[in-house]
Amino acid sequence: KTVATRLTSLLRDSDTVARLGGDEFTVILEDIRDIQSIAQVAKKIIDSLAGMMRIGEHDVYVTASVGISVYPEDGQDVQTLLMNADTAMYRAKEQGKNTFRFFTADMNTATLERMRLETSLHQAINNNEMQVYYQPKYELRTGRMNGLEALLRWQHPEKGMISPAVFIPLAEETGFIKQLGDWALESACQQIERWNRMGVHDLAVSVNLSPVQLNYSNPLHTIDRCLQRLDIRPEQLELEITESGLMQDENNAIALLHQFKERGVRIALDDFGTGYSSLAYLRRFPIDTLKIDRSFIRDLEQDEESILMLESIIRLAQNLKLGIVAEGIETEQQLKILRTLGCEMVQGFYFAKPSAADTAIAFFLSQQNDEHAIAS
């Protein structure tokens, strides 16, 4: 009601404001002089809605994403104009929200492509297109591989290997990440069981848990099912969770993480150092390991500040008796700096790229007989 009031107060009597449903409103502007006038109205709407709203005893802040279509260039009937405005609105959301975008023809092409990709994604598990790859983690003290990170890969039948940077956000937006994440978690646990039967009992596997899974799904049910049905030990499984996932519903996250810990499953805080509340909230969560974000590693060789920040994070982890993993290692010099700073574990392309399970375990077994470890 507040949004509707603010919208109508901005517009002329000849304009129309309608609520289509949910949190979507449509504004029809008639007798517009030029494109700049439309942009000015869109800006006024965004600014007006950005102001604080008082709902009962609570102060609420709202942002708006605005998509604009213009008659007759963008459509000559209501349905087409609405559809194209909606497409432009989603482009505004993709580009940071709290902004406006005019519809362009190329948006339709991108939207159709996204819809096709979304349809294919929902069929990918049943079509055996999804794979779990594994990237080794190394202990710097011994130079030996003692863990693996499970990473989702999508081998599309026509487009080839699709980047996780493309399909993971799409899966999160559509909610399909709940099924996809459960499948990845169960697949990784099944792989641990296969390796146990091969006599490889010392490898722990970490699996990424999406913020959507953590807050809107039931990963505990999947973990319980795996621990009960499969021949694996709880300590062989580690869940990697981002700070953004923890902060969405802090109390729920704390309760859930404690339930993971009660079962003996380890917890790693991924992308550490990129959030604003990491230090303030760190002790509230039952975390075992910090994973240093690769952005700190990338500039180690040229940026003194990165080294100082990295040193602070490593000392923090040591003082809190937490494990520490640096990811994204690509050069020998980065490795030397991390060793000097006292980092415990590392992973990155310098050692091995993510690979299929058979390749990953063959690499591990060959390393068992290799005297030239990375600690040398």
Image (cartoon, grey):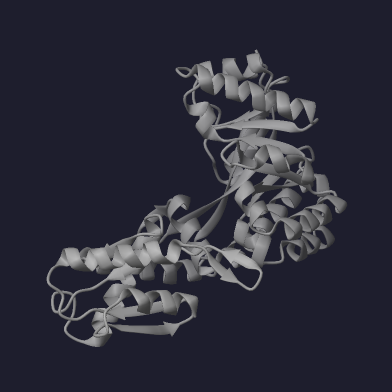
- For the residue pair 167 and 304, the one nearer the viewer reads as 304
The percent position of residue 276, horizontal first and vertical second, equals: 60, 41
| Residue 251 to residue 352: above or below | below
x, y percentage for residue 231? Answer: 82, 54
Q: Is residue 9 above or below residue 198?
A: below
Residue projecting furthest to the right: 262
- Left or right: where 210 falls relative to 107: right
Query: Do we see residue 372 in this rendering?
Result: no
- Pinpoint residue 292: horizontal percent, then vertical percent: 61, 33
Whether 351 is drawn above or below 38: the answer is: above
From the viewer's perspective, tell me whether residue 61 is left or right of residue 324. Answer: left
Q: Is residue 278 visible?
A: yes
The structure residue drawn at horizontal position 37% and vertical position 70%, both measured from the top left corner, is 116
Left or right position of 369 against 63: right
Task: Please indicate whether residue 37 sits to the left or right of residue 160 in the image.
Answer: left
Is 321 drawn above or below residue 357 in the view shown? Answer: above
| Quadrant of the image occupied by residue 259 | bottom right
Q: Quadrant of residue 34?
A: bottom left
Figure quadrant of the C terminus: top right
Q: Give me the residue at 81% from left, 58% from top.
A: 227
Residue 291's x, y, as percent? 64, 36
Q: Quadrant of residue 37?
A: bottom left
* Residue at x 24%, y 80% (from the top left corner): 81
Looking at the image, which is closer to me, 227 or 16? Answer: 16
Q: How many marks?
A: 0
Of residues 85 and 110, the one drawn nearer to the viewer in this rendering: 85
